[in-house]
Image (cartoon, rainbow, N blue to C red):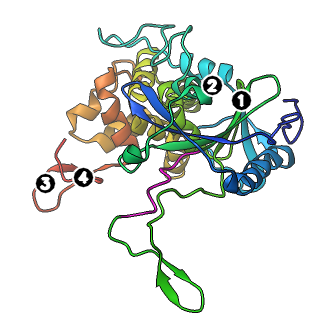
Amino acid sequence: MTESDGQTWGTVDLSGDPHIVLGKRQGRGIAAVRVDVHQDLFNKIRPVCSKAILDTQTTKSRGFDPNAALEAGEEHFRLTVADIRRLNQGLTTNSSSESSPQIGEPIGRPEDDEEFAIVKALRNPIEHRPIKKSEFLEYQPFFYAICFQQKDDSWVSFLRKTNPQQFFRLGRVWCQYGNALKQTDEQPTFALDPSIDVVLYGDNLAGFSASAIKFLFTDARLARAAVPDKVEQLREAIAGTLPLSSKGAASLVAAGARRNSFASRIYGLRARLEEVQEHGPVDAERFRILAGEDQAVLDLLNNEDQLEFEEHQAEIFLDFIEGRYFADDWTGNDRRADRWSKR
């Protein structure tokens, strides 16, 4: 590929026979099988892949952001397997928990000498065994890939994050309409989608959906990749009024690296603080006033009026800043706004 406003892939050869790979989770890896494709479908498949290549050439490329929403038909993500590995290795923490990784230690898989599961599954698609008709309906993949071998024996794969059987449900009556509606003899078992989520060519990727990239590269934990940067931005935003200590920052990073839900909440903290600041300063005095007699919240501040807490207290911090707790008028208990439970 070459750099440009719209990223180009060079010459991609789609003249050969397409191969389809189905993949499903198996432990930390992916179990893949091959689906043989009848030549009658070749001319249905090639235009879908051609359009995906064209979209990488005619839309604006941008760096990967796990929480970004692309402008449909105008943008695509551009990244490499090396980029994904760097994002994965950027997830570090210095939490004091014995079970937590130490500074500089990557959180997640794979190790430096391992391939990501999705990349490994598509390095040589024809090496996978062809799936038998008798097991096809029981196989529940989470993606399928249309693969074409290139003249240098490399492969380009067009991935769709969906179960191609999901549209079809047992019990439905499948019909065709000619002059009248009539039932077909056989229920269809595979739906090819006209859209592509990710194009993988060697170690280069073009993606049209952040959620699809995160899901396909689950072992890279991409949903959590920007947590350290977001926490640092938070520290800078409140440094003058309510400092976040190094320990508190490390605890937030550790919490965000452990759970995707925490990572998403950390991404939204800057916007939440801007909203809060419209109604008053974000400082220790206001923090204590709003905390009232809630000792769990008050414990987030140290003697120097800094936010300082352990990893297990990070959720309390997020809940308080986001206003997720409220006093139950009937019982007086503090409850979470998103579920029926006491703290």
Which residue carries the number 2 mark?
124
In the rendered image, which residue does mark 4 sit on?
339
Q: Earlier in the sequence, mark 1 or mark 2?
A: 2
- Indicate which disc, 4 or 3, sits on the residue closer to the N terminus: 3
Q: Nearer the viewer, residue 324 or 29?
A: 29
Residue type at numbered disc 2? Asn
Amino acid on which the number 3 mark rests in the picture: Gly
Residue under circle 3? Answer: 332
First in sequence: mark 4 vs mark 2: 2
Residue 51: percent from the left, percent from the top? 78, 52
Q: Is residue 132 above or below residue 168?
A: above
Q: CA distance from mark 1 to mark 2?
A: 7 Å
Q: CA distance from mark 3 to mark 1?
A: 62 Å
Q: Are marks 4 and 2 in contact (CB under 8 Å)?
A: no
Which dot, 4 or 2, sits closer to the camera? 2
Which element carries disc 1, helix, strand or loop? strand
Q: Foreground mark, 4 or 3?
A: 4
